[in-house]
Amino acid sequence: MEKRLLSSGVGASAGAAPRGEGLFGHSRSGAGKGAFIFIASAGRKQSPSRPGAGWRPGIAGTGIWGVAMSWRPQYRSSKFRNVYGKVANREHCFDGVPITKNVHDNHFCAVNARFLAIVTESAGGGSFLVIPLEQTGRIEPNYPKVCGHQGNVLDIKWNPFIDNIIASCSEDTSVRIWEIPEGGLKRNMTEAVLELYGHSRRVGLVEWHPTTNNILFSAGYDYKVLIWNLDIGEPVKMIDCHTDVILCMSFNADGSLLATTCKDKRLRVVEPRSGRVLQEASCKNHRVNRVVFLGSTKRLLTTGVSRWNTRQIALWDQEDLAMPLIEEEIDGLSGLLFPFYDADTHMLYLAGKGDGNIRYYEIGSEKPYLSYLMEFRSPAPQKGLGVMPKHGLDVSACEVFRFYKLVTLKGLIEPISMIVPRRSETYQEDIYPMTPGTEPALTPDEWLSGMNRDPILMSLKEGYKKTSKIVFKAPAREKKSVVVNGIDLLENVPPRTENELLRMFFRQQDEIRRLKDELAQKDIRIRQLQLELKNLQYEPEVK
């Protein structure tokens, strides 16, 4: 394992220094620039004015002489070293959005090529806005919302293959599938096309399978991951290997592996169909929060907190989680670090919750694996970030990534474009390789039977064009038990905490009150029918 300390005057080795800095460490945590790194020989004190007796060419000695003689600037050329962030003009932002104040660690935002969805602050249940991307500017206070959940909405994700289908999960223990009209919402939407009940506690995460249509994963506070087949509207598999709350889920490129982080300080790589844990790491020195697969490189990257409570990232080999390949400390701030990986450019973006900056790196296949590129800075702190899919980017402007930044204090959503500066206005094939498209590679039955297939690729040269229209068909609703692995998921589960007991109590009280009102109305109706029957019996016969 290789460990880097990004602070002035501390270094592990010359190879661990950032790109183009040699032994003169580049401080990314606010330390002074141009600081020397002194490497002392064990058991010998030497003069800094000349090389000592044990000095050899190519090996760092002590003091200024050793550093000056052994240091060689090693610049690593990269086509992305000059990538910069460009914030959209105010008229191209989304203003007046009542962004949720929920403290749940999530993005609360989802974007695709047509719509922007944001979880909003609301009373009496959870809701979120769905806004067409071309409808920028100020959003009216009475703008229509999706408001069918009884509890706060904790996560939302767009279907990668159907532009107007979005999944949401909530504190009310449900997962719901919504179908947005073609032109956006004209009135409040309260009826979901599909309601999925299977978790016994609130649901914190939802993820669509990257290559299979209508396969959805949900992670609840009951420590379980359910795999839903939306063609039948039921869970078909359950992953029950976690011992605490699941914090993050990430798929590899073909969806054959699922990586999870958990509150029990463990990183797991799971085969989703069988639920078998293939690799597991105990991260006591690196308390993991978020994980992301790095495309098809068979590596994972995690963000977390070190034993000194500094923010940290770690790179892992997915086939051996015994020890991270590298660990790198970022800074001493307390906000959660969100990682975003672009498999086409091999760029990694790190954005902290409550920060105003976004760092970006380039991932390599050889040491030092991680090369620092640049940092986008902004004075406004971000609550969360949505990411535009590749087919929604502006290739004519050499845009390689686009964030949608949630600024809670201003009620503002800011698009931030990451741009590669190029003089030519022609299509840049070197920064836009073939990328995963909008066509599923597998059906749910094929994936459940054990098949794996790489995503179907598309070119961005001609712009985004939907070649075929996949329509979501909700299954017929039937009330029946939901049995997975021999367990009925809808049976009453005893509460685990006092707050959960109180919520269940008040929920039952509301149900009892509703049933009493319904019974009273039926009693009144019965009496009315009895009176009408008596009147008919005593009416004189008409001759």
Image (spheres, grey):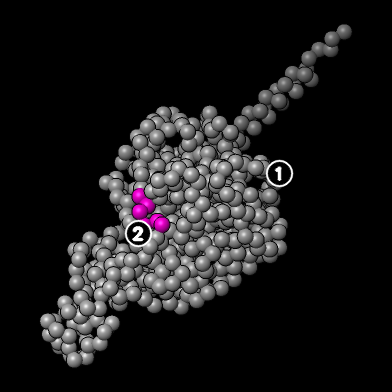
Q: Is residue 102 visible?
A: no
Viewport quadrant of the C terminus: top right
Main secondary structure of the magenta stretch? loop
Density class for disc 1 (Cα within 10 Å; few <14, some 14-19, many ≥20) is: few
Instruction: Work out whether mark 2 precedes mark 1 in sequence or the reverse, and give the earlier one.
Output: 2
Give the foreground label among 2 and 1: 2
User: At label 1, which amino acid type do we have?
Assistant: Ala
Q: Position of residue 383 (x, y in %)?
A: 36, 48
Q: Is residue 160 left or right of residue 5?
A: right
Q: Is residue 290 magenta?
A: no
On residue 373, the disc is 2
User: At label 2, which amino acid type do we have?
Assistant: Leu
Viewport quadrant of the N terminus: bottom left
Q: Is residue 346 or residue 267 the one in the foreground?
A: 346
Q: Position of residue 446 (x, y in %)?
A: 71, 59
Name the residue: 28% across, 70% down: 73
* Residue 459 vertical position relative to residue 65 in the rendered view, above or below: above
